[in-house]
Image: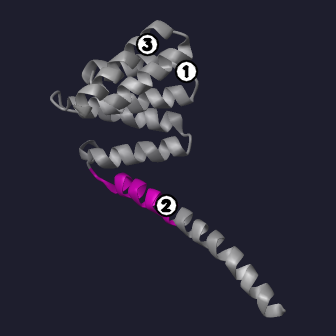
Amino acid sequence: MFEVYLMLTTCFLLPICYLITNSLKYIYNQIEILKSIQKTKNKKNIDHKKIIYAANVYMNRKQWIDCITMLEFYINQIKVNEVKIKAQYYNYIGLCYQSAYMYKIAQKYYLKAYNKLPLEKEILKNLANIYKISGNIENAQKIDQKLILLNKHQNV
């Protein structure tokens, strides 16, 4: 009888251990990336992918101000011809402000991202969403129409 109890307990605890281990690995990877960014001597030349990863870490931890501050700093470091990166940073800043319930500011940053990359689906979705939240249904429908046309052109 005791063996059955141990087997049932083990079967119950194994998935929990697996989930905890995966969570710990995820947190460890986040800390390592953030440490590697901190150790970088020239903070202006950090890889774009690491900045986006750090922004995602801050957003997952709901540290909106840290994320916004970091992205604003790196927007000013971007070269003029790197439009896609700049639009992506504006989009992330808009997400931070939207998560902090500052919809007017979020809309401003989504529009900046839209002006840089008007055919980027993620930016269009976020812009349509913020218009809907703000009650600007007319503009939301226009953006939704652009998304539909963009999807049709990509499927052809």
Nearer the viewer's eye, disc 3 or disc 2? 3
Nearer the viewer's eye, disc 3 or disc 1? 3
The quarter of the rendered structure image containing the N terminus is bottom right
Task: Determine the residue positioned at 38% across, 12% down.
Answer: 142
In the displayed structure, 31 sits above or below 141; it is: below
- Give the amino acid at mark 1: Met
Q: Is residue 134 left or right of residue 144?
A: right
Crowding around mark 1 (Cα neighbors within 10 Å: few <14, some 14 to 19, many 20+) is few
Q: Nearer the viewer, residue 43 or 1?
A: 1
Q: Is residue 7 left or right of residue 117?
A: right
Residue 77 can be seen in this image: no
- Give the amino acid at mark 2: Tyr
Mark 3 and mark 2: span between their CA atoms?
38 Å
The quarter of the rendered structure image containing the C terminus is top left
Residue assigned mark 2: 26
Q: Secondary structure at mark 1?
A: loop
Residue assigned mark 1: 102
Q: Which mark is residue 74?
A: none
Q: Secondary structure at mark 2?
A: helix
Seen as rendered, the residue at the extreme right is 1
Seen as rendered, the residue at the extreme left is 81
Residue assigned mark 3: 141
Magenta highlight range: 25-41
- Give the amino acid at mark 3: Gln
- Dominant SS of magenta comes to helix
- 149 within the magenta span: no
Give x and y (percent) for residue 66: 48, 38
Q: Nearer the viewer, residue 139 or 55?
A: 139
Q: Secondary structure at mark 3?
A: helix
Residue 62 can be seen in this image: yes
Name the quadrant containing residue 11. Answer: bottom right
